[in-house]
Structure formats: C-alpha cells, structure tokens
Amino acid sequence: MSIETASSLLDPSLLRLRESLEACAQPLDDGSESHKAVSKVVEILNSISHVPQSENDVSQYEDENSVPDYSISEEALHEVYQCLSNSPSKQMVIDVLSMDLPQVVCRMGTLSDKCQKIAKIIIELFVSTCNPRDMIAILCEALDVEIEESKAPLYYLLLFNGLAQVLLLIQRRHLEQVKVTIPVVLNVLSKVSVLNLEEEHNKSITELFESAVRIGGSIQEMCKNMDGRRKKELCAILGLYILHNIALISQSRQKISSCTSIVLHMSKFLPFCGFSYFGLITGSDVTTAISKISKEDDDDLVRCFSLSKDGASLSVIWGHINGVIANSIGEKLELVVKEIQRSWIEMWKAVGMLKYPLSSVTCAWEIKEHALELLSNIMERDSLDEPKDQNFDFSSFVPSIFTTLQAIQMVMMGAMDASLRKKAFVVLKKIISTIPSSDRFDILKALITNSTSPTMKALLIDMVREQVAGQYQKDAKNNENVNDQHVTEAFSWSFSALDLVEVILRPPEGGPPPFPDNSEPVLSALNLLRFLLIKESTGQSNGIKVLTQQTLQKIYLEWLLPLRMLVTSIRTDNEDGGNEFTDHLMCGLNPVLLVLYRCIELVEQSMKHL
C-alpha cells in the first residue's frame, strides 16, 4: 500500500518521524526514555497534521476552490503502519505506541479519504494485537476529547469501529467493560447529534450512528454467551442503549429519510431485549429494564440513559411512520392500540409517554405529526365507560397528562403547517373530553392560568363553555327523570366556570385585565358569562342557580363596569388614530364591546327579576 512520492520522501518531518519510530523499536530499559520516544512521534504527527502541507494548502485562504494536499499526512500514517506491522520488534512497538497513538492517528484520519483508510487499518492493528481490556480504556479516553466540529464525526467513527471490534474480543468481565464503554459512547453521540454541519458532513453523522449499531451488535453477541442474572442485566443495558440512540437520531438534524434505515436496524434489537411496542408506549419496559441495573454503584450508568423514555415512545412512532420497521420485528400497531384501549390505566400511561416527542424542541414536525396521529388513534375508544375500579387513581396520572397537553399546545402555537395545528387542536379536545369530569375543569383551568398565549387562553375558555353546555345537554336528555349526578356536575361546572370568568376579568394581581393584549381571552370569558346568564334567565338551567343577587351585583359592579370604563376609554383615545395600529386595535375592541354591553344588559334584567 505504498503511497510514496518524490516530494514527500524528501520532507524533513517524515525523516524525523521515521527516526523516532525506529527509536521506539529499540529496547529501552529506562521508562522515561521510552516515554520521550513516543512523545516525539506524537509531536511530529501533530505538527504534520496541523500545518499547511503544500503551496496549494497555503493558497486555500486566497482561493476557496483550491484543494489541500494531504500527501505528507498520508505518507506519515503509512510510515506508522509500516513500523507497526513490519518491525522486527513488532509487539514491543505496538505496546509502546498503543497508549498515545490512537488519538492522533484518528485525528489525522479526518484529513482525507486516504488518511481515513490508513488510520482505520492502524486502529484495527492495535485492536487485534493489544490486550482488549486495555484497548477499551485507550479508545474511551480518545473519545473523551474535544475535536473540531466538522471533523468530529469522522474522528469518532474510527474509534467507534475500533470499540465494536474490541468488545467481541473480551473474554471475561463483559458486564463491567460494557458499563465503562456505554456512557462514553452515548456522550459522544449526544454531542454530535446536535451539530449543525454542512450537508457534506451529515453522511458522517449517519455513519457514526451506524457504527453505534455495530457496537450494539457486539454487546448482543456478548449476551448470547452469558446466562443468569448478568445476562438479564446486560440485555437491559443493551435495550436502554438502543432506546437512547433512537431518541438521539430522532432529535438530530438528520432528514427523516436518512434516519429510517438506522432506526430499522436499531429496532431489530428490541425483541432480543424483551421489549414490545405495548411495553414501550406505556413505559413499563423501560421501568423494568432500569430496575435491573439500578444499583448504588451504577447511578452514573442509569443517568446516561436519560433519553430512554423518549426513545421508547419514539420507537413506536417510527413504527407508525414506516410500517416496514414494525413488520420487521413482528409488531402490528393497530393491535397494540386496541390492547391499550382496553384499559384506562394503560391508555393514560401511553398519553403520558407521548409527552416526550411532542415537547422536544429538536424533533422534526413530521415526527410530532405522527405522534399526534398515534395519540388520536389511542383516544378513539368505542365502549370505554368511566373506570369502575376503585383502585384506579386518576390523580397519579395528572402530572404526565398535563405535560402532554402543554406539549400539544406548543405544537399548536409553533407549527407552520395549518393542518398540523388543526390536528393538534383536535387531539387536545379528545384528551380533555376523555378526562374524568371531576378532574376535567381543574386541568382546563390550570392550562389557562399557565398559558402565556392570549389566543390559547381564549381557545381553552371556549372549551370550558362547551363543557358546561354539554352538562346542560345531559340534564335535558333526562328531563323527566333527572340524574342527580348530572345536576351536581352541571352546578359544579357552572360555579367553576363563573370562578374562571372572574380570574380573567378581575385578575388576582388586581385591577382590570391587561388590555388590549388580552382582548381574546377577555372576549371568550365574556361569551362564557353571557352563556351562563342566558341559561339562567331563560329557565334552561334545570333549576340550577349559581347567579344569586349578591353574585350578580359583584359581576355588575366589580367585573363589568370597570371593564366598560377601560374599554370605552381606550376606544375614545384611539378613534381618530387613522393608522394601522389603531385600526387593528379597534377591530379587537368592537366585538368585546358588543358582548360586554349584552352581558351588562342581561345582568340588569336578571337583578330586576330577583
């Protein structure tokens, strides 16, 4: 594999490198002398790889289309390979250089295709010749260095390939070696997956994840040769490693099309690790796997799988994106959905698990769209009634469900595609309507008070009005034999809705609502109040009375009149503005005034009849 050229043979740095390599091949009794010899080799290689190597290379700053000449670096790597493979003291030279050379060789391997090819052969030579446990430590140390972003994927790729090979050579203490390797590998992938590189470098990132799959394959081979508790623990580690990788590739800047084949290969590990789509989407498989490795001395290992739940839900979403992935591991997603629908507990677990992809700021919109479609399918129940199981504690699911609902709101506010925003809104309404009635209002109110978007607040208040109307309709259907529970629920919803109107029209911090910034939620709150007033004033409330004389006076004096004063004042000040801002302002004020005056009129009429 000679690549010698006349110019490179005369280069003084190559001559010095050859002399230093020959010095490493000499028996040295003094350890310090051996260290000096190795340091000299590393120093020369670093100097070769960090300086311009030809006139072409120097002129690249003047001509951006010039191609750097890396022939000296290629020749230097060739010299290293020749020394390692052909020296009479081959084993001694390899042992002496193995501690320091892999890092600098892989760094030089990023310079050109030929450099990469030679560096790969050198790493393979180290792996096949040195003690496997020592090589794992050496390669992991080389992975734990900072490298120029554009060169990072290729640098790490060479080391990953070496790790995949050396893991197969481990003869004992397999579990301990994997526990050393996995955190380092995942740390590298976490850094590289978020890089925003030129299109030409994205292929290297894809290849890096493919190499991570090969590392998983090596661990799988280890598992096949083990048994008992240690095998179960190693299988759990492998499963969590794969899930973390699925999360990373899904949240990277890679195109969906380039990720599909990698996820397909990763998904094939899931059945081997005892994972199923049902266990992944409900989170039970992840919990079980973590419990198998959650020892005190393995806290750091568990922490490195922080994205395993993200990966669990994403692995199922990928099965929804591409049916080939699900079919390749014998999963039928429609059957998984039906199984989830048979249990309220499993359904709410699945809703909570889908918060991970939906709340991710780096997941592609296409992935979020498929997450919403999967969530919509899960919520399409045919015959699920309110849970009768006394042991079912819905409150335990509220935090995760609330986070999922907030994540859906983020999609509604952030998506550029109108159809995706609409799809998110439909799913949001489905989930809210499925929540037990006794908890539904509290969750809606929490969403409203925690939202920073006036438009979102308005939409949620409109949902409250729809829910109150629904309670009245239930009573109307049972008009001859009114169900006491429905009466109680309708009263509770009406009373709570009135409470919500007060929060909007008379904020807890005091004073009238921020206006005109909050014109949308104010308008929705007024519409909700108007609805309640009409229901009671026309006798359609089934005997439910929440608007007492005292309440009506409070609404009139503390909510409506101060708001009228504020809105009319703003309108008077801006009537003659004649610019775009005032025109927009008046468009927002007019519907508010219209509903406000109608509410005042209804309150005045109601107080006359009491």
Image: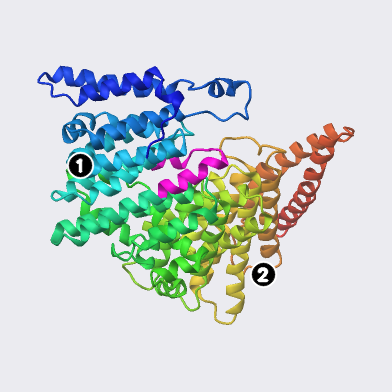
Decide whether residue 198 is among the magenta residues. yes
Q: Looking at the picture, which amino acid does disc 2 mark? A: Gln
Position in image of residue 16 (x %, y %): 32, 18
Q: Secondary structure beneath disc 2? A: loop
Position of residue 51 relative to residue 196, above or below, is above
Q: Marks 2/1: CA distance?
A: 88 Å
Name the residue: 48% across, 63% down. Answer: 435
Quadrant in the rendering for residue 541? bottom right
Identify the magenta region: 188-209
Q: Can you say which quadrant of the picture contains the C terminus?
A: bottom right
Q: Depth check: 258 or 97 in front?
A: 97
Name the residue: 58% across, 24% down. Answer: 60
Spot the residue most to the front.
6
Position in image of residue 390 (x %, y %): 33, 69
Tell me, yes or no, if residue 145 can be seen here. no
Tell me, yes or no, if residue 110 can be seen here. yes
Q: Which residue is mark 1?
A: 129
Decide whether residue 73 is among the magenta residues. no
Q: Looking at the picture, which amino acid does disc 1 mark? A: Thr
Q: Which residue is mark 2?
A: 540
Report the number of discs: 2
Name the residue: 79% across, 35% down. Answer: 570
Position in image of residue 334 (x %, y %): 47, 74
Lower sequence index among marks 2 and 1: 1
Q: Secondary structure beneath disc 1? A: helix
Position of residue 199 relative to residue 230, above or below, is above
Q: Can you say which quadrant of the picture contains the N terminus?
A: top left
